[in-house]
Image: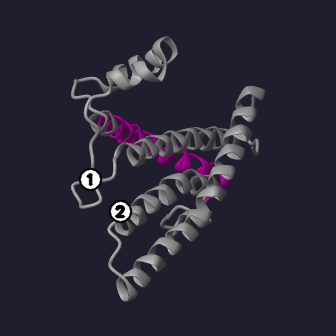
């Protein structure tokens, strides 16, 4: 395999391993929030922020841990026949499932970008061009120019009313990381088809 591809695989693996390990520590944050929720309900007044904070931390935990689980092969798979197949047959099946996963993640990314654009006040047809324009505005006019372009900021309909764009942005980032890791796995499968272990 070319060095560019092996470098890509190693780089994406290292990045997602680092982010995945950080995401694993979010479980302690989640436990702390849920523990505080129980304590506050029992001894004080219920905290209005704990439910949504727990949900947001759970989203971060799952979406940032997703690329790491793809890398480690810890996704769920029916292993009735897979274990008995040859390495090349497994590589073909894995490559097919990775392509299917990449299609699904692409659709999910398109929806996540649209949802994120809506949460920061963009109601147009093409959210990708909106974000590109926002990105260019950041470099030409700075943060003040970006703030002028943002419309209303979507909030949760609950009593706490947190902004929703941070968790939606995190969803977009997590899906992008999963797409990068899926491409690395596809390269790995192609390497196994050629008899090279990456």
Relative to 173, say whether 144 is above or below. Answer: above
Q: Label 2 belongs to which residue?
A: 52
Task: Identify the secondary structure beneath mark 2.
Answer: helix
Q: Is residue 7 left or right of residue 55?
A: right
Q: Marks 2 and 1, how far apart in space? A: 9 Å
On residue 65, the disc is none
Mark 1 surroundings within 10 Å by alpha-carbon count, few (fewer than 14), some (14 through 19), many (20 or more):
few
Q: Is residue 95 left or right of residue 133?
A: right
Q: Label 1 belongs to which residue?
A: 156
Task: Identify the secondary structure beneath mark 1.
Answer: loop
Relative to 146, say whether 62 is above or below. Answer: below
- Magenta span main SS: helix
Q: Position of residue 56 (x, y in %)?
A: 41, 58
Q: Is residue 19 left or right of residue 165?
A: right
Marks 2 and 1: CB-CB under 8 Å? yes
Q: Position of residue 195 (x, y in %)?
A: 74, 42
Q: Can the viewer see residue 39 in this picture?
A: yes
Foreground residue, 26 or 20?
Answer: 26
Q: Residue at x 50, y 39 (%)?
A: 176
* Farthest front residue in view: 44
Q: Which residues are magenta?
A: 85-114
Residue 8 appears in which quarter of the rendering? top right
User: The N terminus is located in which quarter?
Assistant: top right
Foreground residue, 105 or 85?
Answer: 105
Q: Is residue 99 magenta?
A: yes
User: The C terminus is located in which quarter?
Assistant: top right
Q: Residue at x 50, y 64 (%)?
A: 77
Q: Residue at x 28, y 23 (%)?
A: 126
Foreground residue, 148 or 3?
Answer: 148
Residue 40 appears in which quarter of the rendering? bottom left
Relative to 44, say whether 53 is above or below. Answer: above
Q: Position of residue 147 (x, y in %)?
A: 38, 26
């Amino acid at each position: 395999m070319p060095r560019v591809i092996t470098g890509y695989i190693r780089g994406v693996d290292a990045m997602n391993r680092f982010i995945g390990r950080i995401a694993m520590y979010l479980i302690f944050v989640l436990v702390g929030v849920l523990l505080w929720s129980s304590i506050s309900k029992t001894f004080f007044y219920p905290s209005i922020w704990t439910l949504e904070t727990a949900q947001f931390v759970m989203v971060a935990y799952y979406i940032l841990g997703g690329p790491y689980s793809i890398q480690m092969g810890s996704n769920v798979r029916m292993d009735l026949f897979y274990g008995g197949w040859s390495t090349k047959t497994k590589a073909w099946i894995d490559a097919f499932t990775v392509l299917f996963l990449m299609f699904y993640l692409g659709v999910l990314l398109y929806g996540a970008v649209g949802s994120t654009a809506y949460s920061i006040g963009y109601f147009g047809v093409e959210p990708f061009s909106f974000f590109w324009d926002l990105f260019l505005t950041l470099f030409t006019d700075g943060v003040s120019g970006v703030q002028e372009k943002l419309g209303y900021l979507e909030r949760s309909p609950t009593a706490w009313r947190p902004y929703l764009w941070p968790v939606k942005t995190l969803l977009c980032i997590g899906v992008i990381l999963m797409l990068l890791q899926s491409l690395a796995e596809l390269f790995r499968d192609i390497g196994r088809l050629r008899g090279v272990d990456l």
